C-alpha cells in the first residue's frame, strides 16, 4: 500500500479533527495521501508536501478512509467504485450502519490498514437508466433507487415488469428498488425484508401501496426491473439514487434498473459480522424479550 485517500464530512468538526489525525498517522508511516480539493481547502491542507495529492481523480489510491455518517460513506462508495478503491468507514455520525469502526477505534484501525490486516467485502450496486425522448440519464446507487411523488403531490400509478413480465400495476406513494446493502435502509422502513449484504439480489418494495396484497419481491441479479408511470394522475414524480442525485420522471419516460457492472468494496477488520451490526445498530432482536410464562 502506497497511497491512501481521505474523504470527510465537511460539516462535522469532529470529522475534520479526525481527518488531521489520520493524515498524521499515515504520513508518519510513509504513505502518500489523496484528498478531494474541497476537503483540502476546508482542512487548510496545502500541496507543498510530496506526500499530499489534492483533487482530480483518485488515481493510484489503494484504499480510502471515510470519516462521517452513512451519507458520507454512500457518497464515497459511489464515487470510488468506478476506480476499484476499497473504503474503510469510520463512524462520525448518528447511526453509522455502514461504517466498520467507531471514531474511538481510529488508531488501532489505521495500524491494521497500514499492515494490511483486513479483508475486502464486495457488494453489488445498482445502475438506473432514465430513458427520455432523445436522451438517457444514468445513476449509480449503493443503497437504493427510489421513484416517488414530489412534495404535496398525489399518489402515483406505476407499472413494473421484470425482463418483460409484469410484477405490479398499482397506485402508491412510490417504489424502492434496493440492493441487499440498502435492505436495512428505506426499504426496511417500507416493510421490505432484511437481506445479507453479500447476497446478490434486487429488492423491489412498494411504498404505501393502495393494496394489501402488494409486497416486496426479490428478483435475480441478472434481471432488469422496468418502471413506467401511468399518465392518469397529475402528480409530479422524481427518481433519486441514494438520496443524493436524481431526475424528474414523466409518463413518457422509462426507468430501467439493473445490477451495475462495478461493485463497492468495503474494508472489513473482522471485529463484527452482519448479525452483530443488526443487534447493535437496529436493536434486532429486541433487547427486552418477552418474559417466560410461569
Image (cartoon, rainbow, N blue to C red):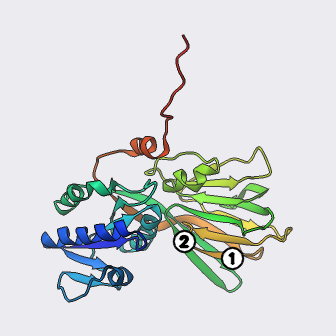
How many numbered callouts? 2
Which numbered disc covers residue 244?
2
Question: Where's the C terminus, which quadrant?
Answer: top right
Residue of label 1: 248
**In the visual, does 74 lie left or right of 137?**
left
Dividing the picture into quadrants, the one containing residue 60 is: bottom left
Indicate the position of residue 257 as horizontal and vertical percent values.
60, 66
Few, some or many residues within 10 Å of mark 2 (<14, 14–19, 20+): few
- Which picture quadrant has residue 275? top left
Residue 133, above or below 216: below
Residue visible at 85% across and 68% down?
233
Q: Position of residue 128 (x, y in %)?
A: 58, 70
Examine the image and state in which quarter residue 127 appears.
bottom right
Instruction: Report the front residue among 11 and 6.
Output: 11
Task: Tell whether label 1 touches label 2 (CB within 8 Å).
Answer: no
The answer, for residue 162, to whether it is visible in the render is: no
Tell me the number on the disc at residue 111: none
Residue neighbourhood size for the residue with mark 1, other residues' Cα within 10 Å, grouped as few (<14), some (14–19), many (≥20): some
For residue 107, say whether it is visible.
yes
Q: Quadrant of the N terminus?
A: bottom left
Q: Secondary structure at mark 2?
A: loop
Say which element carries label 1.
strand
- Residue 288, given in percent of the width and then of the height, sits at 50, 30
Q: Is residue 37 left or right of residue 250?
A: left
The residue at 76%/72% (across/down) is 236
Residue at image position (30%, 83%) is 44
Q: CA distance from mark 2 to mark 1?
A: 14 Å
> Percent from the top left, x then y, of residue 205?
65, 53
Amino acid at each position: 500500500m502506497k497511497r491512501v485517500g481521505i474523504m470527510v464530512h465537511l460539516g462535522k468538526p469532529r470529522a475534520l479533527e479526525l481527518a488531521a489525525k489520520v493524515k498524521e498517522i499515515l504520513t508518519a508511516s510513509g504513505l502518500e495521501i489523496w484528498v478531494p480539493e474541497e476537503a483540502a481547502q476546508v482542512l487548510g491542507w496545502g500541496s507543498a508536501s510530496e506526500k499530499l495529492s489534492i483533487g482530480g481523480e483518485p488515481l493510484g489510491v489503494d484504499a480510502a478512509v471515510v470519516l462521517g455518517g452513512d451519507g458520507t460513506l454512500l457518497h464515497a462508495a459511489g464515487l470510488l467504485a468506478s476506480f476499484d478503491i476499497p473504503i474503510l468507514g469510520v463512524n462520525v455520525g448518528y447511526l453509522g450502519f455502514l461504517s466498520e469502526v467507531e471514531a474511538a477505534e481510529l488508531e488501532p484501525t489505521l495500524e491494521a490498514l497500514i499492515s494490511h490486516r483486513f479483508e475486502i467485502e464486495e457488494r453489488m450496486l445498482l445502475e438506473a437508466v432514465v430513458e427520455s425522448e432523445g436522451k438517457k440519464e444514468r445513476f449509480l446507487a449503493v443503497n437504493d433507487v427510489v421513484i416517488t411523488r414530489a412534495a404535496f403531490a398525489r399518489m402515483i400509478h406505476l407499472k413494473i415488469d421484470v425482463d418483460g413480465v409484469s410484477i405490479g400495476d398499482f397506485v402508491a406513494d412510490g417504489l424502492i428498488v434496493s440492493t441487499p446493502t440498502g435492505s436495512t435502509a428505506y426499504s426496511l422502513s417500507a416493510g421490505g425484508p432484511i437481506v445479507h449484504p453479500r447476497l446478490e439480489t434486487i429488492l423491489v418494495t412498494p411504498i404505501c401501496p393502495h393494496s394489501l396484497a402488494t409486497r416486496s419481491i426479490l428478483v435475480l441479479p441478472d434481471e432488469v426491473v422496468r418502471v413506467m408511470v401511468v399518465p392518469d394522475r397529475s402528480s409530479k414524480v422524481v427518481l433519486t439514487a441514494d438520496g443524493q442525485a436524481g431526475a424528474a420522471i414523466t409518463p413518457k419516460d422509462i426507468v430501467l434498473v439493473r445490477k451495475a457492472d462495478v461493485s463497492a468494496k468495503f474494508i472489513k477488520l473482522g471485529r463484527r459480522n452482519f448479525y452483530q451490526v443488526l443487534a447493535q445498530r437496529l436493536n434486532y432482536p429486541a433487547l427486552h424479550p418477552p418474559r417466560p410464562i410461569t
